[in-house]
Amino acid sequence: MKTRNKITGMLLLLAALALPTIESCNKYPEGPKLSLRSREERVANTWKVENYKINGDDYTSLVSDYEQTFSKNGDYSYSWGSLNGTGNWSFQNDEAEIKVNGTNSQSSETMTILKLEEKEFWYYQMDGNDRHEYHLLQK
């Protein structure tokens, strides 16, 4: 019986020690709580717009054919009808943001990540006082 109590005590101790680690996996406000895939693996995809809002107003119909592609090696591209561009991306701010360089003659854009799952990627960008929020799905 003592051995069983020791094993139970050890399991409870291990669970208590692991809890802060699991909680820290919830890096983004909308999730996921835990993922077995790295953040880089999750973002490296081609994404299409599911929902697009500016200051909470829906403008999805204007960008229904907008796509973004992030590769594992840091390449970035987008296409929107006849418009397209390329650049590079990297995580910043403890992986809470993605910085994109070299597109649209802009020096950089910052995407603040809200949700980064294998098949969903949500972020927002600020343009002056306007918040542009994108909800993307894996293509």
Image (cartoon, helix red, strand yellow):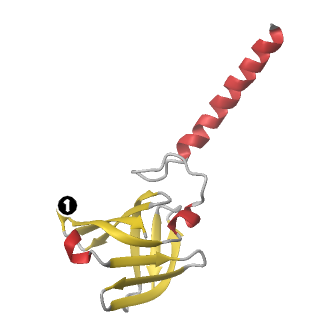
Q: Is residue 134 left or right of residue 25?
A: left
Measuring from the top left, give residue 119's x and y in whole percent.
46, 60
Which residue extends farthest left?
57
Image coordinates of residue 130 in percent, x first then y, are: 22, 69
Q: Which residue is mark 1?
A: 56
Name the image quarter holding the C terminus. Answer: bottom left
- The residue closer to the viewer here, 6 or 126, is 6
Q: Residue furthest top?
A: 1
Residue 134 in percent (x, y) is at: 32, 66
Q: With 115 as the anchor, is 71 left or right in this view?
A: right
Q: Position of residue 60 (x, y in %)?
A: 23, 69
Element type where label 1 sits in the image: loop
Location of residue 74 (image quadrant): bottom right
The amino acid on which the numbered mark 1 sits, given as a three-letter code, is: Gly
Question: Residue at point 51% right, 67% down?
Answer: 43
Residue at 39% in and 65% down: 137
**Point 41% across, 82% down: residue:** 108
Q: Tell me the quarter of the picture where residue 127 sits.
A: bottom left
Q: Is residue 44 visible?
A: yes
